[in-house]
Amino acid sequence: MTHLEQAQQELETYRLLWRENEDRLDHLALLHRLMTEDRPDPRFWLDAMEGQGATFAASQTAERGCHGVSSAGAVLHAAGRGTGIPDPEAAYTTPRRKRRAAEEYKMYQKRIAPQLAENRRRMTALETTVDRLSDPLCREVLRLRYFDGGFVRLTPWRLVALRLYGDDDPAALQYIRRLHAQALEAYSRQRRAV
């Protein structure tokens, strides 16, 4: 692997680190919502059934001939038969469910904290190395290609050319790719110098 390929691969990890942090923080926010809100998130209705499944809970309640809460969780019932649809009001407002969500939140927060910090440290190191480049066009092409955007995929060359030059014709794309090669060379030199 050449030093340019290695530099490019290193820069490509930025988005993966960013996405991993975003996904973990989204999950943490979801656990916080479950812990604090009185209204449930419909995506977690089956979780309220505590892994036993809505159909099982409905059949257990229907067998007992009652309308209301089964041992597996809260289920809505129509005309004496279980529908298998969890009742969001009953399933998520229970103190037991909120306690469990609070415990999960604390454990998950403690577990991911070191990984989040390490990812942030690696991302900051990449950003700092790019910021030290002397050529502003090289800095900008690397930022646009590797750091900007909200997805795991790299920013397409056409969008990089549009952002830098306001044009995406073949000549602009060719110039952007040459500039990118120069920027990778400068990044590689900067990284070796540190």
Image: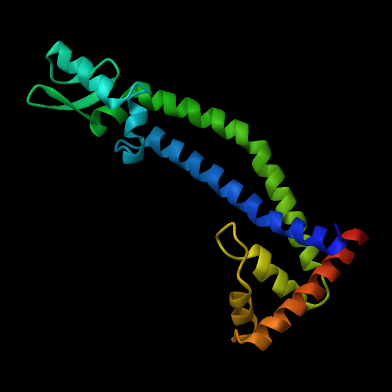
- In this rendered view, identify the residue nearer to me: 5 or 18: 5
Task: Judge from the rendering whether residue 179 lies leftward or rightward of residue 65; answer left or right.
Answer: right
Task: Judge from the rendering whether residue 63 lies leftward or rightward of residue 173; answer left or right.
Answer: left
Residue at horizontal 57 percent and vertical 64 percent from the top? 149
Q: Position of residue 185 (x, y in %)?
A: 85, 70
The tally of labels here is: 0
Task: Judge from the rendering whether residue 82 lies leftward or rightward of residue 94; answer left or right.
Answer: left
Residue at the far left in the pictured view: 79
Q: State the quadrant of the C terminus.
A: bottom right
Task: Judge from the rendering whether residue 187 lies leftward or rightward of residue 59; answer left or right.
Answer: right
Q: Position of residue 172 (x, y in %)?
A: 67, 85
Q: Position of residue 147 (x, y in %)?
A: 66, 63
- Does residue 137 appear anywhere in the picture? no
Image colouring: rainbow
Q: State the quadrant of the N terminus.
A: bottom right
- Res 97 → quadrant: top left
- Res 56 → quadrant: top left
Residue at horizontal 30 percent and vertical 24 percent from the top? 94
Residue at horizontal 60 percent and vertical 84 percent from the top? 168
Residue at horizontal 68 percent and vertical 37 percent from the top? 114
